[in-house]
Amino acid sequence: MTWKTKEQHVRIGDFVGLIQRPQPAKTPAERLSRRFLTIEDLRAGAKKRLPGSMFDYIEGGGEDERSLSRNRQSFRDYSFLPRWGSTEAPDLQTQILGRMSPLPLILSPTGGTRLFRPEGEIAAARAAERAGIVYGLAGLSNTSLERVAEAAPGARRWFNFKPRPDKALTQAMLDRVAAAGYDTLVVNLDTRAIGQRERDFTNGFTAPPSLKPKTVWEGMTHPAWAMGFLANEAIAFPNLTPEAPTGRITSTPAMWKELLGGSYTPLGWSDMEDLRARWDGGIVAKGVVHPEDAVRAAEIGCDAVQVSNHGGRQLDHMASPMDVLPEIAQRVSGRAELIVDGGVRRGTDVVKALALGATAVAIGRPYLYGLAVAGQAGVEHSIQIFRAEIERAMFLIGCTSIQELRDRGPELVRHTASFLPTAPQHSNTH
């Protein structure tokens, strides 16, 4: 049988000859690459595997989630203007706080990580170690900072640190962090209170947690997740005190209150100045959107500013990092490195942020999706997706290095508003 067109005959046999039976995948990485092409695919996989309340804890934002949606939209508001010419394979290496990284990518601290996979922080740290990129451990993580260090000794590890009004307590905690080999502190400046995350409230993620019948039902209908959750250590928060935990750690209502209810202690710039005097390593001021705060952080000696609205999980209706990044880059003017997080789902998002002045980009939800789907292998796959997409985007816009991308950024990336026609100027003569 043939189909006849004006130009040629097309035989069904020609198509049959192109059909190939795929060979079985030989490794977990190969299986994941066939099934999950994008971060959105991993997101769908995580949503399927996790109970609804657990997925909502990853996915949700504050109040009406306007900040959450703005983070994604703000990346869409920028467009590429690629230039034609011969281009070599892009080099993705870059320097982050004095050390080379093979990618301009950081795994940002995330709390409660073992809720999504029993291996939790250890799986994520090992994935970062294999990729050679920075892993940030949350102060409200479920695995002690010592255990993470032992599990991933070759990883570059940062710790999400909370200064205390009691300076002796602050110093004791700093000593613990330093002894475990963490070289940089990430200090949240945007958690004076915990945002009203209404999905969590509805699901019983309160302080202390309120188990609801629907939560039990969700666990029963997600047996793979439930078996992993029940067969492993209870969820606890072993990094809240200066003493390294010994033996089995159990959670307490106070721990859950700090995670979900917030425990405000008044802190200001003087506390950051004190921290700078006490700590010889790097300091990242995280959660900055106001240019004046970025300048102040640089002036007191913070090595980097993480331009962030906490992934849209804190104050709703906040500016997104991409809304303010160009101004912050101009105001800081190289006095501190700039890290961007929030709404990053594509390699093109990373490229846009770098072009607008970022040193690196941090991800949270994307690697948690991978963790929920396949543990360490899933986190590694999320990193690989970004690697491939960043490289492809740089090739297509005509950049061969991260430094070239930063240097030529204003030429290659523009806000879509700049393409809109301007209103004609009418003469006011009579």
Image: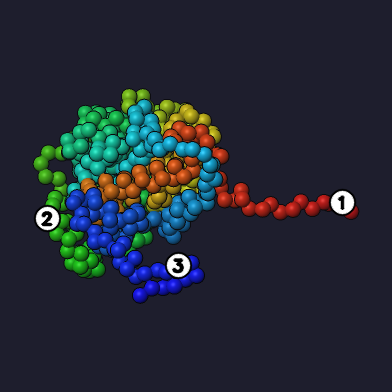
**Residue 181 against residue 254 in the figure, above or below:** above
Q: Amino acid at mark 3?
A: Gln
Q: In the image, what residue occupies the spot 28% across and 53% down? A: 33
In the picture, the quarter occupied by the N terminus is bottom left
Front label number (3 vs 2): 3
Q: Which residue is mark 2?
A: 231
| Residue 391 on image: x %, y % | 39, 42
- Nearer-N-terminus badge (3/1): 3
- Residue 227 in percent (x, y) is at 14, 59
> Tag on residue 8?
3
- The answer to whether residue 271 is seen in the rendering is no
Q: Give the structural element (helix, strand or loop) at label 2.
A: helix
Determine whether 365 is above or below 246 in the image: below
User: Quick one: which residue is furthest to the left in this view?
Assistant: 247
Query: Which of these two is toward me, 290 or 109?
Result: 109
Q: Residues within 10 Å of mark 1 (few under 14, many from 20)?
A: few
Front residue of 324/100: it is 100
Q: Check contact, mark 3 vs mark 2: CB within 8 A.
A: no
Discs 1, 2 touching: Cβ within 8 Å: no
- Neighbor class of circle 3 (other Cα within 10 Å; few <14, some 14-19, many 20+) is few
Q: Which residue shows up at 49% across the image and 38% down it?
A: 86
Labels 3 and 2: the sequence-earlier one: 3
Spot occupied by residue 216 in the image (x, y as percentages of width and height): 20, 66
In the rendered image, residue 9, in percent from the top left (x then y), is placed at: 42, 69
Q: CA distance from mark 1 to mark 2?
A: 82 Å
Q: Is 327 left or right of 131, judged from the image as shown?
A: right
Q: CA distance from mark 3 to mark 2?
A: 63 Å
Which numbered mark, 3 or 1, is in the foreground of this view? 3
Q: Which residue is mark 1?
A: 429
